[in-house]
Image (spheres, rainbow, N blue to C red):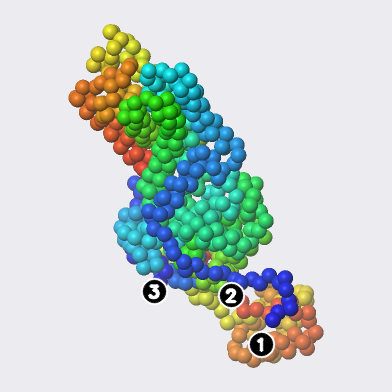
Amino acid sequence: MSDRTGVIHDIGYRHYDGPRLGRWAITQALMVSSLRHAYGIGRSGKSKVMPIFLLAVMVVPAAIVVGIENGLQFDKPPVEPVDYIYLLQPVIALYLASQAPQLFSRDLRYRSIVLYLARPPRRTDYALAKLTALVAAQMILICIPLVVLYAGALLAKYNFLQMSRQFVAGLAGALLLSILLAAIGGLIAAATPRRGFAVAAIIAVLIVSFTAATTTMAIVDEKGDMSSTAARYASLVSPFNLTEALQTWFLRNDRDGSWMPTTQQGLVFTAVYVLLVAACVWGVNARYAKVARG
Amino acid sequence: MPVIATASLTKRYPRVTALDELTVEVGSGVTGLVGANGAGKSTLLKILLGLIAPTAGSAIVLGHDVVTGGEAVRALVGYMPEHDCLPPDVSATEFVVHLGRMSGLPATAARERAADVLRHVGLDEARYRPMGGYSTGMKQRVKLAQALTHDPKLVLLDEPTNGLDPAGRDEMLTLVRRIGTEFGIPVLITSHLLGELEHVCDHIVVLDGGRLLRSESKAALTGETGVLAVEVRDLSGRDRLGAALERAGARARAEGPLVLVEISGEETYDIVRDTVAELGLGLVRVEPHRHRLEEVFSV
């Protein structure tokens, strides 16, 4: 029985003897928090503007397409999911340029990376968690409009099997693109603690590579039907063209305006894709190894 | 079992040898790691965390080899880096909770622990504000809190008093002392200032150019010399006291404002007390005269 109510007792330091999670659970937690940060969740209101705006820009045209195809009853959908991705590639590029530095440059700039490195996860876990979060963030960005397109196509009563096939092809294309872009964007962003540099460098790399690829193609491809081998290999230069060709070959997804790589070309494209992703992931990892040595 | 034990630990870079055959043991309580800039303190901490591999030799931290068990070590150790490492746009609470989770605490436990340690380091109302607006003292407290949030079995503090004003320095050192005693967590604290470690450490390790200069308990280093330092109100009082003590049979000499009396036994204390009382002098202090750490290491 105490009559001294309202007294705050200093209970002293309390030790913790509850559960401690392992590396995998920690990596997962880092991935989830990074994914949230990629959409500004858990950050300031200002940092939500860009990702949410870009997501809206991705979804609104899809909604319009759905409205039109349902209203006018075309014989087939005006735009296939895979093609929709490449139609809106500048938006995807902008998203990558704005958010990759948020995930990678930030911890380097404020040197909070040291506090992560001094904790159980290895630097590889850190790098992979960040890269996975970036892949997932881009999948969300690309796949929401694809889902809208798919739902709209079903609503317009197009052939279910064909639409599902195209939707799955779209998802596969989105995944291929997200992985490659995350690897490239992650490497550039991890290379510099300066956010502005990273944003500019990512945009520059994507624009330059895409322009180089399309210009070369236009010059080399005399007949204008992508039958020239040189024109086809020019696609290797740009991540967007590379994943588009790879996806077409992989899923035998021959569409209007696309070209089907030969087996040999397909294998070259696959090899280049795998090498590019592996090199970038290795680069990100090597970068953190250097940071750890400090 | 020592908390940290290294054996012939060596780290060579292409141009410099950062650590040279370092064999040292660190036990419980607060251990000071002292050395000039470039003496190898930070390199040692990084090796102990398993962040860089030694060129030769071995280091065992809390029973784990740092090369093969870096992950286990890092789960048990809290680390406070020397430099700034706080993002300005999140609050201390959010940041410490997040880092608690990065140490493997479940979400709820991470929140409770963060609140606890932030209170212990004395960061109350400010902890919900973005850290960009914090003073250096507050930032140092957050850095200390994140090192404690997962209830480590050892904390490594790299120059925690860096950039603090004298008052902040004292508060930080008091906190460090509490971690080592009250919280019962062994502390390894680095500094290039011997003086400030003198009051908080139980044990001092001195590095110089990557080599171990000395590793001794503070008592051994600054051990009592058998001399009593007495200070009285004014200088004429000092001389009168000195003379009276000599007459009473004690060996005394003046040094600065102090009278140093050789302790020959329990009765020396009585003689000093009685003499001061007889002369009616204003007594300022009586204390055992210790070597300062600076004297110990300046040889």
Most foreground residue, B168 or B261: B168
Q: Can residue B254 be seen in this view?
A: yes
Q: Residue A82 carries which label?
A: none
Residue B54 occupies quadrant? bottom left
Q: How crowded is mark 2: few (under 14 residues within 10 Å), some or many (20 or more)?
A: some
Task: Give the distance between the C-alpha atoms of the residues marked 1 and 2, in whole angstroms.
Answer: 17 Å
Please determine whether, in this image, residue B277 is positioned above or below residue B76. below
* Chain of the residue under the numbered disc 3 shown in the image: B
Q: Residues within 10 Å of mark 3 (few under 14, many from 20)?
A: few
In the picture, the quarter occupied by the N terminus of chain B is bottom left
Structural distance between the alpha carbons of marks 3 and 2: 30 Å
Q: Earlier in the sequence, mark 1 or mark 3?
A: 3
In this image, B245 relative to A135: left or right?
right
**Which label number is shown at residue B269?**
1
Report the amino acid beneath label 2.
Arg
Task: Please report, as a chain letter, where disc 1 is located.
Answer: B
> Where in the figure is residue B259, as x and y percent of width and height?
68, 78
Q: What residue type is labelled 1?
A: Tyr
Disc nearer the start of the sequence (3/2): 3
Q: Residue furthest left?
A: A264
Labels 1 and 3 in the same subunit = yes
Give the residue pinned by disc 2: B290
